[in-house]
Amino acid sequence: MMPSKSGNLSIGDGTGFVITPAGLPYAGMTAADPVHLGLDGTPAAGAQRQPSSEWRLHAAIYAARPEFGAVVHTHSPRATALACAGRGIPAFHYMVLLAGGPIRCAAHATFGTKALARNCVTALKGRRAVLLANHGVVACAATLEAAVILALEVENLAGQYLDLLAAGLRPVLLKQRDLAEAAAQFAAYGR
């Protein structure tokens, strides 16, 4: 889902977050490599590496959405393909509810910028996942495990949606009533 050194992830702690470092392939990463930052981007004393260039994106999400304890940003292939077309993922399948509803595509801005962070936070309103135009995916949750699972589900939905489009089929979109009924089912699912 995050080949070599593309994408990044973080875990928030209420006062800041720990984020993957810039430019380090994941296969070579050790427990000492992630960087602890305050929400303003100030690194903790003794930081060994530079934080991911997307630290502003993570900081803005934690500041705007304190319920999130983890943020996963990927360049997963199918979801990124949709993002490069400036398309979100509509409510063609009830599993979009895991993201809070149809998955929006945030307006384009250069990676690592305040503008990208702002666009992402705007698109995340009422959602737990978004696509970033010409860039990739952001998935957020209370825990890192849940954020990774959501990022994988977004990639799965993107693949299904692209398969429909490639086959020349027009996806049937669920109505708000259908989504509300599915959300009620989810409320008791697995309990």
Image (tube, rainbow, N blue to C red):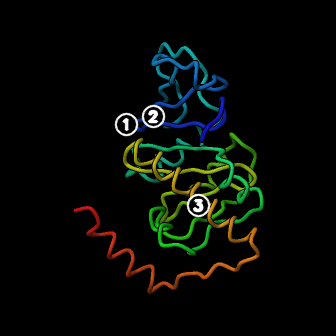
Q: Position of residue 109 (x, y in %)?
A: 74, 51
Q: Is residue 87 left or right of residue 72?
A: right
Q: Residue at x 26, y 62 (%)?
A: 190
Q: Residue at x 64, y 78 (%)?
A: 171
Q: Is residue 150 left or right of residue 22?
A: left
Measure the C-alpha gap from mark 2 to mark 3: 21 Å
Report which residue position mark 3 lands on. 122
Q: Mark 1: which amino acid?
A: Asp
Which comes sooner in the sequence, label 3 or label 1? 1
Q: Mark 3: which amino acid?
A: Thr
> Mark 2 touching mark 1, by CB under 8 A?
yes
Mark 2 packing: few (<14 Cα in 10 Å), some, or many (20+)? many
Which comes sooner in the sequence, label 2 or label 3? 2
Q: Residue at x 52, y 41 (%)?
A: 59
Measure the C-alpha gap from mark 2 to mark 1: 6 Å
Report which residue position mark 1 lands on. 13
The quadrant in which residue 133 appears is: bottom right
Q: Position of residue 98 (x, y in %)?
A: 44, 62
118 versus 105 height, above or below: above
> Mark 3 touching mark 1, by CB under 8 A?
no
Q: Mark 2: which amino acid?
A: Phe
Q: Residue at x 59, y 27 (%)?
A: 51
Report which residue position mark 2 lands on. 17
The quadrant in which residue 180 appears is: bottom left
Which residue is outermost to the front? 167
